[in-house]
Amino acid sequence: MNDLEQFIKANRDVFDSEEPRADHFELFEIKRNENRKTNPLLSLAKLAAIFLVLVAFGTLLFYSISRNDLPKITRNNELERVEWYYDALKQEKLSIIETATQRGLLSQDLRNDIFCRAAEFDAKNEQLKRVLNTSERAQNELIVVNQLFVERLDMIVNMLQQNN
């Protein structure tokens, strides 16, 4: 321990029982203000450094935009996972519908109609995928369309299970 710590520990009861001197807070404020005073050259150097960083960043951004080197913001990985998920759900529902048709719970005509609509759905999905690289809206629409189609298949499966 240093001498100051030993002095404070030795005289702790005095520190706890007495108030600081009257000019203590004024001296504290003066010392704090002295520490705040900075060299004007240092402040100017800080401003110059900030300015240079901003100019460099702006120049880099300008050249990247002019050369079209900005990274494309795509959600390909996320979109592939979502697409895979809904495709798996769709295949599961269609498999249940096929099994229900084989058991005689669903007519062949209704089964054909459902599978025909599934094929139409796949064709529309392919059209949306062609637009995906340029439109985030199309990506969102693709997800919504997948959700709606799986919900419709799920309704059919639930109706089949209730009638079973």
Image (cartoon, rainbow, N blue to C red):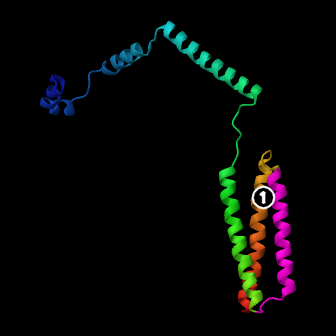
* Magenta segment, prevailing SS (helix, strand or loop): helix
58 with respect to 137 (left or right): left
87 with respect to 42 (left or right): right
Location of residue 20 (image quadrant): top left
Location of residue 50 (image quadrant): top right
Point out residue 78 in the picture as x, y percentages from the top left corner: 66, 53
Point out residue 49 in the picture as x, y percentages from the top left corner: 56, 15
Residue at the spot x=53%, y=15% of the render?
46
Of the residues shown, which amino acid type is indicated by label 1?
A: Leu
SS for dot 1: helix
52 with respect to 139 (left or right): left
Residue at the spot x=73%, y=71% of the render?
90
Residue at the spot x=69%, y=20% of the render?
59
Q: Which residue is mark 1?
A: 142
Q: Nearer the viewer, residue 61 or 9?
A: 61
Magenta residues, as a range?
A: 104-130
Residue at the spot x=82%, y=55% of the render?
128
Residue 126 is covered by the magenta coloring: yes
Please, is residue 100 above or below residue 130 in the view? Answer: below
Q: Quadrant of the N terminus?
A: top left
Please, is residue 34 above or below residue 10 in the view? Answer: above
Please, is residue 140 above or below residue 158 in the view? Answer: above
Point out residue 143 in the picture as x, y percentages from the top left corner: 74, 59
Point out residue 65 in the picture as x, y percentages from the top left corner: 74, 28
Q: Nearer the viewer, residue 76 or 163?
A: 76
